[in-house]
Amino acid sequence: MILPDDQWISGSMEGTMTDQQSDGVPVTSGSVEAAMSDDGASLGGLPLARDLNLPHAGADGRHADEPSPFRDGDLVGTLGPICVVARMRPDAGEAGESAICKAAVDGPVEVTRTGLAGDAHGDRAHHGGELKALYVMDAAEQAHWSRVLGGIEPGRLGENILIIPGELGGIDDVELGAILSFGDPADDGVRVRVTGVRNPCPTFARGVGRADWVEVFSARNRVGVYLSVLSEGAVRTGDEVRVVSSPGHRVTCTRWFAHHDPRDAQALLNSEIFGNCVIAPYTKKYVRAAAHEQVG
């Protein structure tokens, strides 16, 4: 959906739509900067990308059997910029503020069970906590969205860590529930578990100042993933990211977000029953909702 010019940015926001496009998406300039001093209320009612009230939670429901390219021990990529909150912004949501504006910091950075030292969250009901301790994005995706938004620094999409993809794929291509290592586990390395995918939300849209943002960002199905921290330690830019173990159910993060296929939902639940996978509650509610739906 392409919105009319007067619906891109409204109220006191001063970002503008340019006459350029990036991969078919109209480019805006200055919207992120303008959003930092505006709570986004003028953007109106905004959607949630995956809504439990919709069939397949709003995804298309039919996968094409896209397997993960990774085996245990494979290199997923390397750590790029590591980011913590730079400043809070006002937000029209219930929390009243958002910590989406993050910025890169020099490493090493300590990782605790609740995330990076020095980070913070505004809406703690939906963001942060041990199950969403870290939000990581593919560095190639951040670069794409930086072009769409007229140039943004790492961290401005709320990501804690950018992962520079290796030859096999990116962070969105790992299986839900996979265990990963950052750096050398034998040398103060960190182990994490993939607990779910980002569900682009109104807070995110207000944070970049675009009423169309949830739809636009979701269309590529590479929304980044949340991690829980299994072993604390320190992370540094350049650390390797490797798969320690995958559940083997074949449902990657991007495949789940794109489809919410009932067959994949059953595979996830079966994997948990057999002890191969831990499904976080915030993910499981979508899995259970999809498990008995008919594929359209």
Image (spheres, grey):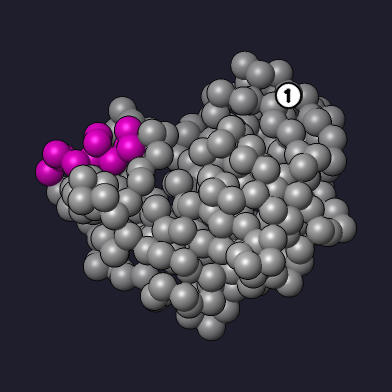
Image point 55% across, 29% down: which residue? 126
| Residue placed most toward the observer, 150 or 103 | 103
Of all residues shown, which one is farthest toward the bottom? 167
Q: Is residue 170 left or right of residue 155?
A: left
Q: Is residue 197 visible?
A: yes
Q: Is residue 100 left or right of residue 134?
A: right
Image point 53% across, 83% down: which residue? 167
The residue segment tinted magenta is: 284-294
Image point 69% across, 27% down: which residue? 122
Q: Is residue 281 above or below residue 20?
A: above
Q: Quadrant of residue 31?
A: top right
| Residue placed most toward the observer, 6 or 28 | 28
Q: Position of residue 285 (x, y in %)?
A: 32, 33
> How many labels, in total?
1
Q: Quadrant of residue 40?
A: top right
| Residue placed most toward the observer, 191 or 295 | 191
Q: Is residue 170 visible?
A: no
Of all residues shown, which one is farthest toward the front? 186
SS label for mark 1: strand
Q: Is residue 60 above or below residue 242?
A: above
Residue to which mark 1 is pinned: 97
Instruction: Confirm whether the magenta stretch covers residue 224.
Output: no
Q: Amino acid at mark 1?
A: Glu
Q: Position of residue 129 (x, y in %)?
A: 58, 33
Decide whether the magenta segment is chiefly helix, strand or loop: helix
